[in-house]
């Protein structure tokens, strides 16, 4: 074993290779323990160090637990792994929520919470109005609708003017629902409750 390299194993860790002269020095200075496993390079047969001839262990060094010297083997690295295997493409498309927050000017979450709450409420009202069509300006005249209802209400002409053909036809056939319906419509128009067929406010 004097002309070949030798490996040392201790507690599952392998060090080496070392020359036999180095192994002898390790046994003398306590670096190599009697219960360490050693084997020559190219062999899988391991022996307990104290059973190898040529190695001398002192009783003082046997009670110590020195650290093995660093191995002279070159360090090997795991194969390079492409990051694309573990990564997914990230979409930079802006989400609807982020777009809404940016529109309201509160995408950054700093500032006074009361101002944020007011901005959110305003944005919510704007979205509700936009979705329902409420608040849209109609091309129908407020004054014309009042005059038509006042003078031609029993014929339902104001209803036809606003685009409510079906209810206008009912009032035409029933005399404005016997004047009651046309009278109610007059007040609805005056207080801007009655709108055109698209929900627009009379101009």
Image (tube, rainbow, N blue to C red):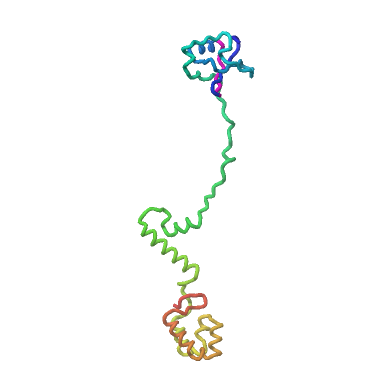
What residue is rendered at 51% in x and 83% in y? Answer: 161
Q: Is residue 14 magenta?
A: yes
Q: Nearer the viewer, residue 88 or 43?
A: 43
Looking at the image, the residue that sits furthest to the top is 54
**Which residue is more in the foreground, 117 or 158?**
117
User: Does the magenta portion include 165?
Assistant: no
- Magenta highlight range: 12-20
Q: Is residue 80 above or below residue 16?
A: below
Residue 201 placement (x, y as % from top left): 46, 76
The quadrant holding residue 82 is top right
Q: Nearer the viewer, residue 158 or 21?
A: 21
Secondary structure mostly seen in the magenta stretch: strand
> Does residue 171 sit above or below 69 in this rendering?
below
Number of dots carrying numbers? 0
- The residue sitting at 61% across, 10% down in the picture is 1
Viewer-side residue, 185 vs 197: 185
Residue 104 position in % (x across, y down): 43, 59
Q: Residue at x 47, y 16 (%)?
A: 63
Residue 158 appears at what percent x and percent y? 49, 85
Quadrant of the image for the C terminus? bottom left
Instruction: Locate residue 12, reporting x and y percent.
Output: 56, 24
Residue drawn at the location 52% of the way across and 87% of the way down: 156
Is 27 placed above or below 118 here? above
């Amino acid at each position: 074993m004097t002309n070949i390299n030798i490996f040392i194993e201790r507690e599952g860790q392998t060090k080496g290779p070392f020359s036999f002269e180095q192994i002898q020095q390790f046994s003398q200075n306590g670096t190599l323990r009697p219960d360490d496993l050693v084997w020559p390079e190219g062999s899988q047969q391991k022996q307990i160090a104290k059973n190898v001839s040529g190695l001398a262990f002192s009783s003082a060094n046997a009670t110590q637990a020195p650290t093995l010297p660093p191995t002279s083997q070159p360090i090997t690295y795991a194969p390079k792994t492409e990051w694309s295997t573990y990564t997914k493409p990230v979409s930079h498309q802006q989400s609807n929520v982020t777009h809404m927050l940016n529109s309201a000017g509160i995408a950054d979450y700093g500032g006074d919470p009361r101002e944020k709450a007011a901005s959110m409420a305003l944005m919510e009202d704007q979205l509700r109005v936009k979705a329902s069509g409420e608040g849209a300006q109609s091309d129908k005249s407020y004054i014309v609708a009042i005059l038509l209802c006042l003078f031609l209400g029993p014929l339902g002409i104001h209803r036809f003017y606003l685009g409510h053909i079906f209810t206008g036809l009912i009032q035409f056939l029933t005399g404005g629902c016997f004047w009651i319906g046309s009278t109610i419509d007059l007040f609805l128009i005056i207080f801007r409750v009655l709108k055109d067929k698209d929900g627009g406010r009379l101009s």
